[in-house]
Amino acid sequence: MTTIFAKLVDVTRCDGCRACMVACKNWNDLPAAPEEFKGSYQSHDKCNAFNWNMLTFTEHEAEDGRFEWLFRHSACMHCTDAACVKVCPEDALHYTEFGTVNTNYDKCVGCGYCVQNCPFSVIELAKYTDENGKEYEKAQKCTMCIDRLREDMMPACVNICHMDALVFGDKEEMEAMALERLAQVKDRYPNANIYNPIGVDGTQTFYLLAEPPSVYGLPENPKVPTSATIWKDYAQPLGKAMLGVTTMAVIGGFISNKLFNKQGQEGGDHDE
Ligand code: SF4
Ligand code: SF4
Ligand code: SF4
């Protein structure tokens, strides 16, 4: 039986040091991608093609009137039922042997449907130029350090975290640990909760939050768009059986474009 692994992010332990951001950049050899200073301690608006994890800084007034900073290590959630996998017409986005979600860069054609449909906005296209000067794009996001996992090493961000805010292991063990920690912090954080959303069948990056998900900028009830489910689970297998894989790949590109290239039409909450 395959073991599903998960990263538990316990935000109640995070001190906002951002070592996880640096470790990710360092291990994955990601270039600097600075953004304009917007008057916040937060370095970037959100995760992007060259910042696979990012610390959100939220100013929050506690129920007793205290002012506090809330920190959240954000990265790909590695959804069990992943919208990005569902909408990818090339099967470039796929599930791995660890239960995580990865990109096959050879298959990715840079169509951007994954970017438009991710409920957590953590995947982006990176631009490259080949030796002939031709530009192309590939989807980029946290890989859960799969190269390290295959060598029995922890993800780089987990390895560096000096507060034990990031822990990694068998998902069932991580869920048990999250429940234990939740019980421990309830006195201090009465709104504490575990965020492992059922709308996407749970996630392999999941949270112990001190406040409701929306306070941290997380969707309360993320779901895979219905159009994506119809496409991947019904239309595509039926089409392949009837028309063959190659014909369906061509038709798939066209239909995917119609179904998913809809920015500004269905809004960005993907909660249909
Ligand atoms: S390394 Fe740990 S303590 Fe530091 S910012 Fe990341 S999650 Fe928080
Ligand atoms: S968080 Fe977004 S990019 Fe990551 S697996 Fe889920 S849908 Fe895909
Ligand atoms: S698991 Fe690896 S790739 Fe993902 S955020 Fe952590 S260091 Fe980056």
Image (cartoon, rainbow, N blue to C red):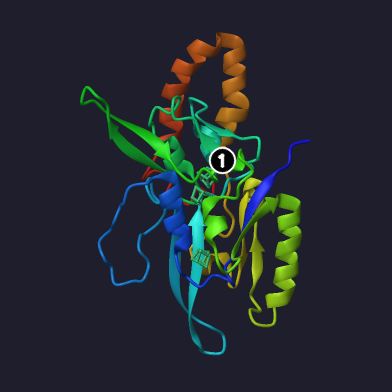
Is 6 situated above or below 167?
Answer: above
Q: Please state if 26 lies on the left or on the right of 129 as rendered.
A: right
Query: What residue sits 61% from the left and 18% below the top?
Result: 238
- What x and y, as percent, mark residue 69? 47, 77
Residue 208 appears in the picture as rendered: yes
Query: What residue sits 66% from the left and 79% below the top?
Result: 190
Front-most of 85 and 207? Answer: 207
Quarter of the image containing the N terminus? top right
Q: Quadrant of residue 110?
A: top left
Residue linked to disc 1: 146
Q: Residue furthest right?
A: 1
- What x and y, as percent, mark residue 260? 44, 35
* Secondary structure of residue under mark 1: helix
Front-most of 129 and 66? Answer: 129
How many marks the image carries: the answer is 1
Q: Please state if 128 lies on the left or on the right of 122 as rendered.
A: left
Query: What residue sits 73% from the left and 41% below the top?
Result: 3
Question: What amino acid type should be assigned to the residue bearing mark 1?
Answer: Ile
